[in-house]
Amino acid sequence: MKRQLLSFLHRAYRLIRPVLFLFKSETIHDILTFGGSLLGKCSISRGIIRSLIRVNNPILAQELHGITFNNPIGLSAGFDYRALLPEILPSLGFGFGTVGTITNQPYEGNPKPRLGRLVKSRSLLVNKGFKNDGIDELIARRKNSKFDIPIGLSLGKTNSRTSCLSQNEAIADVQEAFQKAITARLPFSYYELNISCPNLYGSVSFYPPQELRKLCEAVGTENPDKPLFVKMPITESDADTRAMLAVLSEFPYIKGVIFGNLWKDRTSPVFNKEEIAKATKGNFSGAPTWQRSNQLISLAFKEYGKRFTIIGCGGVFSAQDAYTKIRLGASLVQMITGLIFEGPQLPAQINLDLIDLLKKDGFKNISEAVGVDNK
């Protein structure tokens, strides 16, 4: 019955999607997050949605770093940058989710347009530049919240034309954001450190090993009280990625890595030529990130699989997409673009189909499938 309902919801969404896509991307985003926030505040709406579409099965459950994930599908940082959706996410079928990226100081966002759709390329054009209300406002609103699933807090460098433009300023800024979050004892299950947003002002970079080490040392002095995952770029070479992973491995409080963030190369054959020719300023999520994300998941698992939990992010539109990342080495999988293109029932659909895929391959728990294609 649930499979039929989810299939119906998928078909229904595909029918209304062309109408939604007539409106500007950011307008629809704001409507959806506001609507999700309202639904999340009402226990009746949460319960109805949960009973209709959420999928629960112990084959999908894992405990990682003391956190119980009832399923591996999470909402990536970059969608809920005002922390409006944690209450509704479990009802939609998510096993976890990340809010943010939040910065020490608020930022109104890069000049519009900040979001766009490349429908034929199955991609979103993103140029928000860490648009958010700032850590102080988040603390005021969320200090006493309680969440039904693990919710993480993504933190990054304040984006500004006039400040945080030097390496030392940027490090101090990130460190202060962590200090505020930790001191406030916010109810998040984990932190993410976003070092890889390509849409920021200035030339600050945490990719060079010496700069990454300085940042990690600074954050470490705040004694993070939750597991921390680092959001990694997918634009760097294998050699540069290895160098970054080597630095991250020096810091015990860093428990995992996320591969990865947005795609820059507009010459990729994944793009529809007409769409990419019209694309404005920004970088790309979705299908263009798929191949490189998978390559780096594989690299990280082969060389650091015993050291880091790996989270796969990029180009997930189906259970088979999620399963591919899991078999390459990802214990958890994050998504945004698939949700926009396939509908809000997608996390539940993925989990339902993942159960079938795992059972077909003889696995009793999802943890047994992690990295099997690289062992």
Image: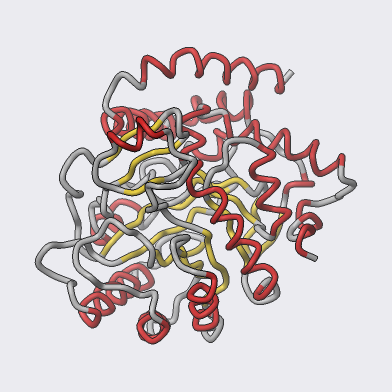
Rendered location of residue 341, percent (x, y): 48, 29
- Left or right side of 133 for 36: right
Q: Residue at the location (18% across, 40% down)?
A: 112
Outermost residue on the left side: it is: 162
The quarter holding residue 305 reads bottom right
Residue farthest toward the right in the current orientation of the protein: 362
Q: Write the residue at 62% across / 69% down.
A: 300
Place of residue 312 in the rendered image (x, y in percent of width and height, measured from the top left): 58, 55
Viewer-proximal residue among 116 and 51:
116
Position of residue 67 relative to residue 361, above or below, is below
* Residue 57 versus residue 209 in the image, above or below: above
Q: Which quadrant of the figure has residue 236?
A: bottom left
- Structure colour scheme: secondary structure
- Front residue of 306 and 235: 235
Screen quadrant of the C terminus: bottom right
The residue drawn where x is 74% and y is 58% is: 370
Side (left or right) of 237 relative to 203: right
Q: Is residue 212 above or below residue 76?
A: below
Is the N terminus in the top left, top right, bottom left or bottom right quadrant? top right
Percent x, y of residue 282:
29, 47
Residue 352: give x, y in percent of width and height: 72, 33
Q: Residue at x 40, y 16 (%)?
A: 18
Number of marks drawn: 0
